[in-house]
Image (cartoon, grey):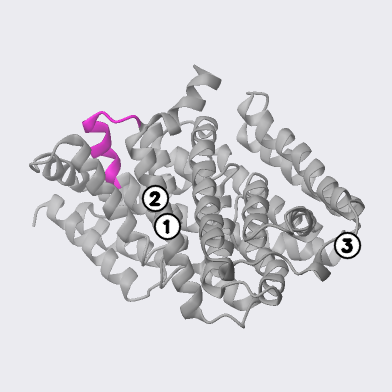
Amino acid sequence: MSPEMLGVVLLATLIVGIFLGFPIAFTLIILTVVFGYIGFGARVFDLMMFQAIGLMKEEVLAAVPLFVFMGHLLEYAGLMERLFRGFQYVLAPVRGSLYLGILLTATLFATATGIIGASVTVMGLMAGPALIRSGYNPVMSAGVITAGGTLGILIPPSVMLVLLGPTVGVSIVKLFAAAIIPGLVLSGLYIVYSMGRSFLNPSLGPPLPPEERPKSWKPVVQELSFGMIPLAVLIFAALGSILAGLATPTEGAAMAAFGGLVLTIVYRRFNLQMLYKAVMRTLQTTSLILFLAMAANMYGATFSRLGTPTLITNTLLDLPLPPMGILILLMVVIFLLGWPLEWPAIVLIFVPIFLPVVQQLGFDLLWFSTLVAVNLQTAFLSPPVAMAAYYLKGVVPQWSLTSIYRGMLEFMGLQVIGLILVLLFPALALWLPSVLFD
């Protein structure tokens, strides 16, 4: 068997192993050892060692635990609760006001956290009871919470973008800038859809009952001020300094983590138990991501050395399709991979396989990276591996998984529309980076 075909068998074996439910990181390492040894002998161990060392020397990866730590600190600081209450009070007389409050809160909070577990969980905890009391539709409510909560993985600072940038070979700072407008477009689509349906069918999202509305403007101003002003300062210190070129992503992440720690102290939420929980959850999340990144790096190096990426590239380029048709085909494949797989596996394993094709076709890699990022939004709302559903079900047990899945699928359709818009109008991704950096 030729080395190229051995690589094809390696890829097929990986896909089968993933669908059988084996742990992805360990599967990658085992397959790398077995197929690498068959392909080029004991040199596979040297290759694995150098790949592991090379990856761990990437300074930008230090931003991953810092952004994750910041997200957990903001969860404990109670910032999202204040934001939501403020929007809830201001929008009380409006149909679908809770939907709008959730989506506005989620969009603002997404600019200060790069993880989704905290956003969906906190949003479910604080908005779920209010939605149930006010008679809101469970399907629409579940879709709004899960879709809004997943914006944090696209709108920078995002852990996914921190990993995607080095994988594709584009600047993380430029990728942060490129993802801002598509993230806001998705948020806008969610808002238009939920508010439009509430206007046409008031039973889906009635105004808040009079007894739940504020008696004066004082609590409204107080909640919005305490929720928005510290968040704006944190965003300016972290994301603003990165985009302005005053700090690297790692330095900006360190400032953001420090700011999150200060906020927990200011809001009197800081204690050693809280700090311990935030640190442990950060360690668990970061270890999972970086271990998978190391395993995928070893696998990718072995896969490339067998020559299979060249075979795949030539096969795709020989298809009777124009360049845009091949790009759409790649987006469809990534969309389908998002159903059984989570985003780290797709970014670290499959994107490097597709990258030579995109380079041969001459597409802008920053635009391609943004398309991948928007596409991977669907992975969080696509059953059966959609973790957002299980986060929400855990904190709002009154809603059935069927209702949650139905709501998620509706908003996944909106995500596909957002992906099509970025595909048809590349300026949505490329305009802001060109203004800031070119």
Tag nearer the camera, 2 or 3? 2
Residue linked to disc 2 = 375
Secondary structure under badge 3? loop
Query: Horizontal and vertical percent for residue 190?
Result: 52, 53
Magenta highlight on residue 196: no
Disc 3 residue type (three-letter): Asn
Disc 2 residue type (three-letter): Asn
Disc 1 residue type (three-letter): Thr
Q: How packed is label 3: few (under 14 Cα within 10 Å), some, or many (20 or more)?
A: few
Residue drawn at x 61%, y 77% as measured from the top left: 394
Secondary structure under badge 1? helix
Residue drawn at x 30%, y 71% as measured from the top left: 17
- Compare residues 272 and 132 and report the one nearer the observer: 132
Are the residues flagged by discs 1 and 2 in contact, CB closer than 8 Å?
yes
The numbered dot on residue 34 is none
Q: Which residues are magenta?
A: 353-364
